[in-house]
Image (cartoon, rainbow, N blue to C red):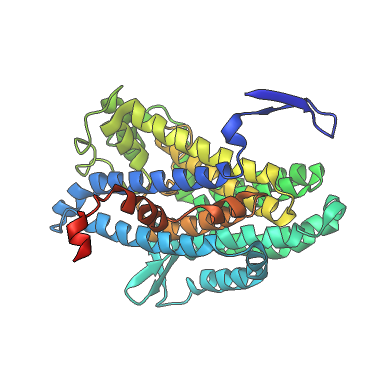
């Protein structure tokens, strides 16, 4: 590590960490963390869902097989996305928004919309069910980046910050999601809008007014829903939070799982809570199963991986000179890290249970494919960092390296055989 002189803005000296300053660092960090989380998630989905599948008289790998299929689809989509130039992402922003709004509105069409857990947020397309709100998250990111890419100092004015993005676009998307009673997804979308506006340079008074409006909106949504009201009151009730047979049973059993895991866990596959005690063990509460089976090292691994993912996204935000890339990268960072924080906070009891999956880890096809598509976009941004594309294109392929080394390692034939 070495310190350079102060930067051109007169700030403190910039610390350089050797190879961490390589143009390839962000690209490989995103790729490595994403791959690790997906593989780790597949392992834990298989462990957490196997018992439930057997009790349902299905093969133990039923849920795992579906998640593996979606992981393969997501990997293909992400690989395709990494090859897209930045200008293409800007071009599809409005098309993505229109498509996302149309799909989200379609959940209210009888025969198409499917309700799960009290939320009308699913769309039945033949034998496949998709969650349009997951695609709407990416559409918000792309649209925010496209709108603010060329605003410059105009973003500091209310008309340029509020009218183009907050009122007609974000409000419509959020209204459709909240109309389906999905408050958890609405909170994540609110974080995306906040992150996009903050990095774009929106005026500070907008966040003050916006925060008051959001608090008032959440209070109204909670007060007008007996289900949400009971969730909040029970979350604040110590007696409920200690009774495994009460309304708070899911949270209590999640804490039991973490407590049973202790320091080193009970071993992969050894969870007791997944035997019908803890609902949504392979989905919203998979973090509890990780803590029970893998102990503190398993939970810390998840936290470290999401921390590295946040750092990789932050590198893109701070290093790029393209405003679209900066705003869109910030949107994805707030989306994934915010959603992970809400999920983990719900499991450990710091937040009420709102029902959002742990990105890349929880079971769920729409979430996994969309998240991998968003991270594929981030990889395409990283490829366009100064010097990154040139270094990636200059790498010899695995086949070329193998062919270049193989002949030198093969024993030469005797002279008499060569003469024949």
Q: Is residue 360 above or below residue 136?
A: above
Q: Name the quarter where the N terminus is drawn.
A: top right
Q: Which residue is drawn at 16% across and 56% down?
A: 56
Residue 87, position in %: x, y? 68, 66
Q: Which residue lies furthest to the left in this view?
A: 57
Q: Nearer the viewer, residue 414 or 16?
A: 414
Q: Residue at x 46, y 33 (%)?
A: 304
The answer, for residue 235, to whether it is visible in the render is no
The answer, for residue 349, to whether it is visible in the render is yes
Q: In which quarter of the image is residue 383?
A: bottom right
Q: In this view, does 325 lie above or below 176?
A: above
Residue 247 relative to residue 104: left or right: left
Q: Which of 349 and 78 is in front in this view?
A: 78
Residue 57 relative to residue 103: left or right: left
Residue 43, position in %: x, y? 28, 45
Residue 375, position in %: x, y? 52, 53
Q: Name the quarter where the C terminus is drawn.
A: bottom left
Q: Which residue is drawn at 60% across and 54% down?
A: 389
Q: Nearer the viewer, residue 365 or 180?
A: 365
Q: In which quarter of the image is residue 380?
A: bottom right
Residue 153 relative to residue 240: left or right: right
Q: Which residue is drawn at 15% across and 59% down?
A: 58
Q: How many marks?
A: 0
Residue 329, position in %: x, y? 63, 50
């Amino acid at each position: 590590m070495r310190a350079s002189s102060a930067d051109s803005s007169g700030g403190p000296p910039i610390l350089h960490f050797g190879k961490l300053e390589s143009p390839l660092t962000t690209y490989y960090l995103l790729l490595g963390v994403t791959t690790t989380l997906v593989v780790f998630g597949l392992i834990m989905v298989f462990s957490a869902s196997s018992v439930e599948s057997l009790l349902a008289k299905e093969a133990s790998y039923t849920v795992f097989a579906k998640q593996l299929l979606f992981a393969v689809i997501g990997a293909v989509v992400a690989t395709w996305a990494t090859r897209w130039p930045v200008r293409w992402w800007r071009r599809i922003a409005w098309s993505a928004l229109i498509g996302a709004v149309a799909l989200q509105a379609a959940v209210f069409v009888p025969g198409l919309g499917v309700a799960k857990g009290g939320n009308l947020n699913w769309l039945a397309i033949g034998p496949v069910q998709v969650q349009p709100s997951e695609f709407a998250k990416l559409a918000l990111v792309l649209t925010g980046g496209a709108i603010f890419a060329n605003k410059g100092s105009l973003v500091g004015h209310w008309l340029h910050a509020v009218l183009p993005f907050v009122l007609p676009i974000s409000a419509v998307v959020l209204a459709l999601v909240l109309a389906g009673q999905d408050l958890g997804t609405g909170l994540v979308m609110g974080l995306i809008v906040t992150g996009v506006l903050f990095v774009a340079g929106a005026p500070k008074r907008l966040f003050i007014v916006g925060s008051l409006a959001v608090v008032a909106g959440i209070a109204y949504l909670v007060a007008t829903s007996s289900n949400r009201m009971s969730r909040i009151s029970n979350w604040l009730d110590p007696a409920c939070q200690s009774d495994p047979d009460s309304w708070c049973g899911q949270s209590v059993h999640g804490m039991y799982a973490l407590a049973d895991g202790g320091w080193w866990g009970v071993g992969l596959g050894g969870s007791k809570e997944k035997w019908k005690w803890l609902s949504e063990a392979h989905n919203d509460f998979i973090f509890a199963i990780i803590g029970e089976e893998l102990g503190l090292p398993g939970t810390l691994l998840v936290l470290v991986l999401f921390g590295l993912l946040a750092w990789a996204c932050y590198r893109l935000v701070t290093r790029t000179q393209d405003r679209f890339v900066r705003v869109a990268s910030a949107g994805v960072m707030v989306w994934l890290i915010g959603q992970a924080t809400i999920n983990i906070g719900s499991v450990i009891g710091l937040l009420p249970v709102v029902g959002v999956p742990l990105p890349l880890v929880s079971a769920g096809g729409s979430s996994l494919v969309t998240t991998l598509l968003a991270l594929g976009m981030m990889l395409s941004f990283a490829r366009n960092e100064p010097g990154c594309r040139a270094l990636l294109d200059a790498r010899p392929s695995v086949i070329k390296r193998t062919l270049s080394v193989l002949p030198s390692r093969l024993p030469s034939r005797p002279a008499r055989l060569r003469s024949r």
